[in-house]
Image (cartoon, rainbow, N blue to C red):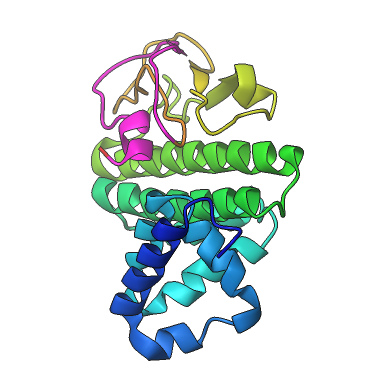
Amino acid sequence: MARAPSPSLAVAGLGRLFAEGGTDALRLWPVADLADLLCVVGSSPALTRHLVGHGARWPLAAALYRERNPGIERLIERTGITDDDDFDAIARGLRRMARSEMYRIGARDLLGLATLDETLDGITSLAEAALRVATDRLRALHARETGDAVDDSGRPIPFVVLGLGKLGGQDLNYSSDIDVAYYYAHDAPMAGGALRASSSAASPRRSRARSATRRPTGKCFASISACVRGR
């Protein structure tokens, strides 16, 4: 209890976990790691809410702090998004992954298990994974529903999201915005369906419109930033 920034918050958080999972769930948590758990729930109501949201399975969610940065590909897998998912399902998968990863990063930081470089790299990888999933999945969704963005020869037009600032430098922190630019391969008019990205992209916490979009433009099938934010 002495490690918890707020002992009263730690007691309240542990009580909420007990209420959700009962004795059986609490017994799954190693006694040797109880001080870690109290430190985490005694630091942030947001982290406690994340664990409570898992119900009786909270010990599995809480134990994630023991893992070092999983990497972008693993984060993408953890979204659970499938090829047939619609916009809302994609957004839910991204939210689920982002909350879990921010818990893992925050808990490791609070417990002194991660270096500063590891923390910054983890937050940046989370942002990159979310942007990659949103970009790839929404373009595929658009192609299924209305046809892909293609050139006059019928070939899909290459599209890239370029990370700027702290994102490009692998240096995002908890309060960072994400600055990106969206580019198509050329400005030629499109044949068939149109694809346009939004003018902003989301950080793990918030977004600020400070990006550029290059033509071709057309019907906006979905906003990448809205998908990352789950809105």
The one nearer the camera, 87 or 114, is: 114
Tally of numbered tags: 0
Q: Quadrant of residue 151?
A: top left
Q: Quadrant of the N terminus?
A: bottom right
Q: Is residue 229 found inside the magenta-colored segment of the image?
A: yes
Horizontal relation, residue 23 to residue 29: left or right: left
The one nearer the camera, 141 or 52, is: 52
Position of residue 202 relative to residue 214, above or below, is: below
> Residue 130 placed where, x, y %?
48, 41
Q: Quadrant of the C terminus?
A: top left
Looking at the image, can residue 81 be seen?
Answer: no
Q: Is residue 111 found inside the magenta-colored segment of the image?
A: no
Horizontal relation, residue 225 to residue 31: left or right: left
Horizontal relation, residue 154 to residue 34: left or right: left
> Residue 100 placed where, x, y %?
47, 56
For the magenta stretch, what is the residue range? Answer: 205-230
Q: Main secondary structure of the magenta part?
A: loop
Position of residue 205 relative to residue 190, above or below, is: below
> Residue 16 placed where, x, y %?
32, 69
The one nearer the camera, 95 or 54, is: 54
Q: Quadrant of residue 30?
A: bottom right
- The residue sitting at 48% across, 25% down in the picture is 157
Looking at the image, can residue 220 be seen?
Answer: yes
- The residue sitting at 26% across, 24% down in the picture is 220
Q: Quadrant of residue 22?
A: bottom left
The one nearer the camera, 65 or 180, is: 65
Position of residue 21 relative to residue 69, above or below, is: below
> Residue 230 placed where, x, y %?
30, 41
- The residue sitting at 47% across, 30% down in the picture is 155
- The residue sitting at 52% across, 65% down in the picture is 38
